[in-house]
Amino acid sequence: MPPATASPRTDDPTVVEPPVTADAAPAQSRRAALVRALAGPLLLAVVIQNAGNLLLHAVLGRYLTADQYGALGTVLSLMVLLTVPLSALQVAASKAAAAGPASSGIQRRCLRSLTLVSLAASLAVCLIAPLPTSAFHLPGIADALLLGPFVGISIALAVLRGRLLGLDQRRGIRAVAATFVISTAVRLLIAIATLPVLGTTGAILATLVGEALALVYAALALRRTAAASPHPAGPHPWLRAGDVGWSGLAIGGLFLFTTIDLFLARHFLDGEASGGYVAAATIGKTLLALPAAALAAAYPRMVAAGTGPGRLPEVRRTGIVVAGLAVIAGIVVAAFPGLVLDALYGDSFDGQADLVRILAIVAALSAVVSVATYALLAVGSRLSLLPWFGAGLEVVAITIWHGSALQVATASAGALAVTLVICLVALRLDISSRARHVHAA
């Protein structure tokens, strides 16, 4: 059947509307899928979060000495490092929530278990607080002790965010976006207010309070989202042990791969040089926030696609959105590193433009490794553990070359290049082999 054409316009019989071809609907569907992959509200929230974080770091970088700022940056990175298993919890919670809301009995048991695990994790981190205090030359144990309650709160928040994204993409994305905005606003206000009195401790305490209030909002939003779910409540657990363990291994390796350079720089370099590296790395790693948000929203869709024919289009869309956001941001920062440094830190870290440029490019390309890892994790592939190889390679390279901050960054870039190629090849081979298996079956 030939494609239909629209009726001539009555106000001008000589003008005919363009024909609506059979390809128009699929093209519109592809555009709609790409728009969904952008997860607009979540990206906007992360933009706000990034702006707030950069503003806070700008204030801290101007107020503190280079050594103090390096110590604070290390503690804040430790906060994120300790919450890596939480990313695994969020991913596993999203996957479990896709089956539908849990029954009231299971929900109560899950809440009790989550509370106990959070309290146990808080206590464990408090007990080992002297270790990071000594290893990273922190000024006192108080900052490290605050890591304990932060981890406990973040465990619960990660699970709730994962369930929100898995139960209902539309409602969940908006609710998770709101938690980021709440956390950022509270953190910024409290940190700036307490900086003259509490110094670095005020910034860490502000982060803790912001996460706590975000958790309260997430709990209320989850109740509303579960009640509005079109799927009936059933015997669906909030988490499955297998999903948590595998996600923890994969995402732990990914985070270590993208962050180990900062800890090694703090270990090998002197106070002033490590402060400059932390400043430059903060700029670079902030670029990962936007693509990470889009990736978190896309993961339930990649899980749903499985190994079927929809897998490749979903991975392609996610790659375009995530890598595109990261590369655009990386190019902008790499093109104007001095301007970014001056805007954020004034003259506190002059002469670090080359360092910022390298780390911005490293961060942007790391987003591609993240897409490959999540795509492999979505189908349970062991190849999702490849970032562990990259992290090991990075440790070896930086241990050999660490004479300056620039050498550390260059070693990190070399490890990234090798890991990036390996991950892309592995993803391509995995997609091809599973597609052949499905076709043969």
Image: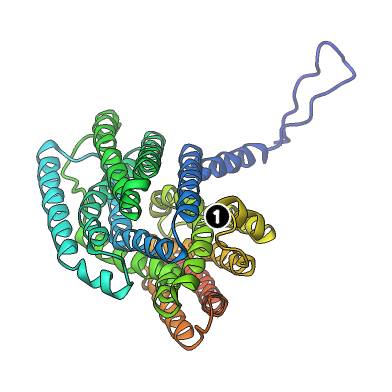
The residue nearer to you, when weighing 32 against 91, is: 91
Left or right: residue 8 compared with residue 154: right
Q: Residue at x 23, y 55 (%)?
A: 146
Screen quadrant of the N terminus = top right
Q: Secondary structure at mark 1?
A: helix
Amino acid residing under circle 1: Tyr
Residue furthest bottom as drawn: 400
Residue 203 point in image, percent of width and height:
35, 50
The residue nearer to you, when weighing 104 against 136, is: 136
The residue nearer to you, when weighing 146 against 372, is: 146
Q: Is residue 120 above or below residue 426?
A: above
Left or right: residue 326 compared with residue 171: right
> On the image, numbered disc 1 is attached to which residue?
345
Residue 367 point in image, percent of width and height:
51, 61
Screen quadrant of the C terminus = bottom left
Q: Residue at x 12, y 36 (%)?
A: 104
Q: How crowded is the residue under tag 1: few (<14 C-alpha within 10 Å), some, or many (20+)?
A: many
- Write down the quadrant of residue 121 in the picture: bottom left
Count of marks placed on residues: 1
Q: Residue at x 38, y 65 (%)?
A: 71
Residue furthest front as drawn: 197
Left or right: residue 61 compared with residue 114: right
